[in-house]
Image: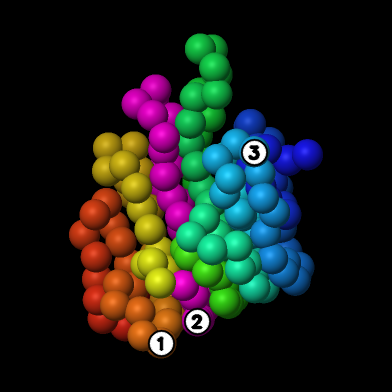
Amino acid sequence: NNPTGSLIYIGDNAYYNLIEGNLVSGGGIGSLNQSSNSIYINSSYNIVRKNIFRDNNNGSNSTGLTLKGYQPDTVRIISANYNHVYNNVFLNIDNLAILLECTDSSGATANNNKFFNNILLGNGSAASITINNDIYTTNNFFYKNDIYSSGVVNIINDKGTTTSVILEQ
């Protein structure tokens, strides 16, 4: 039983992984926070490329890709830094296509991640890209991602500031 509710999970300092050329359909339901992730990473120096993440239809907790820093106990601090996510398709995710976050002030971070040449199409009612916790999620780079969701007002939510136009960044 995967507590993160993820079909693919890279966690707790499992560095330098390559996730490439997969069709990931749906998302699991986990006991940790009842999130439903297609892929969940709380690790650094990973590459996610040339994948299709689609049809994660588990409602408001559905996420295509989550990059998360957190402190699981009093000793370990887990960060999600220096990951590269490119040439992927995120299609028909009920809530967030991409989420970057840190859940506490332990020193864990989600920094210096690069997202480029991804297609985010037809995702849910929330912003397709959401970046939470402004102190611990910094220096993330988004370049030439194509984002479109019909009828969605907010496309990007960066630490509470939303962008309501279709952009190619």
Residue under the image location 53 percent in, 29 percent down:
78
Question: Given the image, on which type of amino acid does mark 1 rest?
Answer: Ser
The quarter of the image holding the C terminus is bottom left
Q: Per the image, is 65 magenta?
A: no
Q: Per the image, is 99 magenta?
A: yes
- The residue that mark 2 highlights is 122
Q: What range is drawn magenta here?
A: 97-124
Coordinates of residue 132 in the picture (x, y in percent): 34, 47
CA neighbours of label 3 inside 10 A, class few (<14), some (14 to 19), many (20+) = few
Which residue is farthest top? 74
Q: Which mark is residue 150?
A: 1
Coordinates of residue 104 in the picture (x, y in percent): 38, 29
CA–CA distance between discs 3 and 2? 27 Å
Q: Identify the secondary structure beneath mark 3.
A: loop
Task: Using the image as rendered, state which of residue 111 and residue 166 is in the foreground.
Answer: 166
* Label 1 close to label 2 by CB (< 8 Å): yes
